[in-house]
Image (spheres, rainbow, N blue to C red):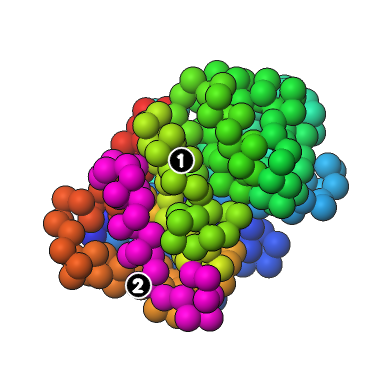
Amino acid sequence: MQFFDLHCDTLYRAVTEDISFNNPNLQVNIQNGKKFSKWCQCMAIWLPDDITDQAASLLFKNAHKKLCEEAEKHSVGILDSKGIRSDHSFIFTVENGRILQNDLSMIDHLSSFGVRMLTLTWNAENCIGGGADHPHTGLSDFGRASVRKLEENNIIVDVSHASDKTLYDVLSIATKPVVASHSNSRYICDHRRNLSDEFIREISTRGGIIGLNFHRDFLSTDPHCASMKDVLLHTEHILSLTGEDSVSIGSDFDGSDIPGDLNNLQKVSDLYDSFLKIGYNEQLVQKIMYTNAYNFFSRF
């Protein structure tokens, strides 16, 4: 099978714990990823909200170095301006736009390092706008300029973790499709990190995609009982709003509390089978698991 994952925190763990991407303690590791006939993994470097500017810059550079070293060591490609040219590839992404430090030239800096997607905020407010914990804070003036410059640099704007106001502001000015790399349906699970039906429709209508998140708190209002079945519920609801071309996977592996029946890359095949068992045809399952995300990135 083929698998395209819009978000994991494996790179952050590998850098901060000084471990290889093939470490068996990682939910995403090279050995399991290479079992897919095609595998594309967005590797995010998470920048905590309370990190200093200096520490953020150092973490970013160390993450890029680690990604390149691991890709070369394990013969995995890295997505560049020429597109996905390998059956097994990484995409370098950044989670938290605080890396910009109120300096638009930093977007050129990210581009020079091969960053292909930027999650505008984490949960707090930053120089770009409000995160999920600040629901009434939208884009700053700098944030508006950042969205425009990100688009000019073909860096995908990721609205996961954004406040509702920030997301509304992004959609009001964006000229290219946006992604919610790891967000679920608020209708199914009423959590501030999930998306309202209105936002799901708007992201889809504008050609964007939504990555289903496996984190317990975003799957169910009873997180302790969350399971793969909840992923199916979110999928069904989002499909009912968007059609077949906007739903993808954004696992949040190695960065969240994931139910036991889905808590590593090996178990993704069980999710594939579960989609088939509830009546999805092979083409639709392939879209969810790989093709929708692949087609989306191919446009940038």
Residue 217 x, y percent position in the rendering: 56, 68
- Position of 233 with respect to 139 (left or right) is left
Which disc number belongs to residue 104? none
Name the foreground residue: 6 vs 195. Answer: 195
Amino acid type at mark 2: Lys
Q: Which residue is mark 1?
A: 198
Q: Is residue 273 above or below residue 143?
A: below
Residue at left offset 85%, top offset 47%: 52
User: Is residue 221 magenta-colored?
Assistant: yes
Could you classify mark 2 by the number of other residues whose Cα lies within 10 Å: few (under 14), some (14-19), or many (20 or more)? some
Name the foreground residue: 284 vs 47. Answer: 284
| Most common SS among magenta residues | helix
Amino acid type at mark 1: Glu
Could you classify mark 1 by the number of other residues whose Cα lies within 10 Å: few (under 14), some (14-19), or many (20 or more)? few
Range drawn in magenta: 220-247
Element type at marker 1? helix
Displayed quadrant of residue 190: bottom right
Does residue 37 appear in the picture of this structure?
A: no
Residue at left offset 71%, top offset 41%: 136
Q: Which residue is mark 2?
A: 229
Element type at marker 2? helix
Residue at left offset 43%, top offset 51%: 211
Name the foreground residue: 24 vs 95. Answer: 95
Q: Compute the Cα span from label 2 to label 1.
A: 24 Å
Q: Is residue 181 above or below residue 207?
A: below
Number of numbered discs present?
2
Q: Earlier in the sequence, mark 2 or mark 1?
A: 1
Q: Is residue 113 above or below residue 222?
A: above
